[in-house]
Amino acid sequence: MTGNVVSLGGLQVASRDTLSKAMESEGCSSSACGSSDGPADMAPEIWAKVKDHPCYSEEAHHYFARMHVAVAPACNIQCNYCNRKYDCANESRPGVVSERLSPEAAARKVIAVANEVPQLSVLGIAGPGDSAYDWRKTKATFQKVVQQLPDIKLCISTNGLAMPDHVDELLDMNIDHVTLTINMIDPEIGTQIYPWIFYDHRRITGLEASQILHERQMQSLDMLVERGILVKVNSVMIPGINDAHLLEVNKEVKKRGAFLHNIMPLISAPEHGTVFGLNGQRGPTAAELKTLQDACSGGANLMKHCRQCRADAVGLLGEDRGQEFTMDQVPEEVTYDPSKRDAYKEWVAGEREERRAAAEEAKAETVATVAEDADALLVAVATKGGGRINQHFGHATEFQIFEVDAEGVRFVTHRRCDNYCVGGYGEEDKLELVIKTLEGIDTILCAKIGDCPREDLAAAGIEAIQDYAYDYIETAVSAVYRARMGLPAASAEIA
Amino acid sequence: MSYKIVQENCTVCGACEFECPNAAISFTNDTYVIDPDLCTECEGSFDTPQCAAVCPVPETCVPA
């Protein structure tokens, strides 16, 4: 592996050493200095942990899939953005899940998915409920799965209150990724988010509840980092409550050694029946979220490719095949057949090398032909994964946004939109939504697009290009950039 | 002297089951039920009934 693997898409992860280096070099964030994120800068054991994990590595999320099983529904805290009664098949929110499984059923489901989804690399237990509090079920599930799938990565997501009690068991079970949801480091702010916790056999409310939660969260973070477990910190951005405060949270978790910080927008609507939904607490706008993320870029590395997926999601980030694997579709007896996953892994290894080489080539060409101070462009890409432009415009439910300048191509974020094309024909009002979603974007690259939407996009100032169908994203985005900057574009035939 | 679970409110999370010091709560017919013969309302064990203290839905674990 050379030193450039993770810099490809502007990978938003790095080792603690890399982070410290980035901090010392006068606020140069990892997202701005993509090349410092390579495995050359990262301890090999850390690179080994993240390289196939779609949530911890932006590059890996093009190739590898995760699945969540909802086996631990009991929770030990109440959050104002969660309503435990709520469940709806049309919803797509963290902690919301349709199917609750016993550890035995969950293990069967994981094997069934592994047989059909070769990209599967990660099994997570994320909710509803708290995986560390409902620990017996979490542990039983993992134990059953690893008997058949020893190479799958295991991770959990927890509020941290019960985590310190089980940290050493994590090590025994080879769980090397833990997500802690930390929304505050100031208990006063916590009182506006957490009405109560259940701790030491008591329901505790008010400031005391947030104080205990805060102390246990910091203890969890320290204990996990001490043991070399990678910690991703999730924070829900709640305007007017913790939005400005998350800068402090970012500094603190970074100082304590969090590997990645994922700031997510509050999802809140009256029909969710949550305290925030009912009291009119709004979520942040995309611009507010980006401003906060940018302000945090000198702290812990930020995750920008999070899809806030459902707690029973299956598939690549940005897709959810959960409905194909409900328990009524999983056979009573399943035996793991490693052939598909093994073949896929082999293919990905080669594909990643090729993509990296193509990206390096494109970058070199851009550097050689574009002025250093040329303006940056934002380019949207319709992709089904694999780092290629391989999706029909009308089939895209989200677009990946890349920023390109003379320095190269970086993944910025994804923007979701509803499926524009339903049943083979486009609907005008949906296209309007998509155009709104693409605000500020110069060019959209897709595998195919009809004449009508292309003209509508052009009228909105966005050029849609299908000439780079099935090319690598970096190759195509670089070529578009060079064309825009008045220099000869690379031929579309170059893959 | 016993608590009961109001079925229509219950989210079937099971937190009450493992907090109960008397193993009085079991998962039966897709729902959790309290065995009144085993329930002590946590007297002698804890200050408050554990099922009611941990339950996420108000008015769900209540005196029978």
Image: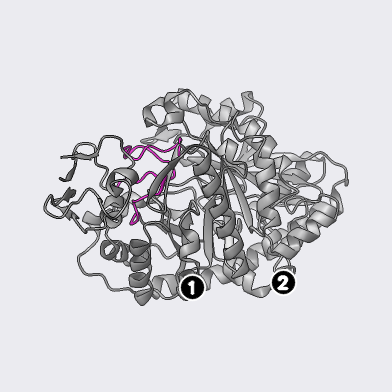
A456 or A121: nearer the eye? Answer: A121
Tag 1: amino acid = Asn
Q: Is residue A411 magenta?
A: no
Which mark is on residue A2?
A: 2
A156 or A460: nearer the eye? Answer: A156
Q: Quadrant of the C terminus of chain A?
A: bottom right
Place of residue A181 in the rendered image (x, y in percent of width and height, measured from the top left)? 53, 49
Is A368 left, or right, of B57 in this rendering?
A: right
Q: Is residue A92 magenta?
A: yes
Q: Dot 2 surroundings within 10 Å: few (below 14), some, or many (20 or more)?
A: few
Sequence-wise, which precedes: disc 2 or disc 1? 2
Q: Main secondary structure of the magenta part?
A: loop
Tag 2: amino acid = Thr
Is A278 left, or right, of A63 in this rendering?
A: left
Is A144 left, or right, of A184 in this rendering?
A: left
Q: In the image, which is nearer the foreground, mark 2 or mark 1?
A: 1
Place of residue A290 in the rendered image (x, y in percent of width and height, measured from the top left)? 66, 37
Which mark is on residue A174?
A: 1
Residue stretch in magenta? A70-99
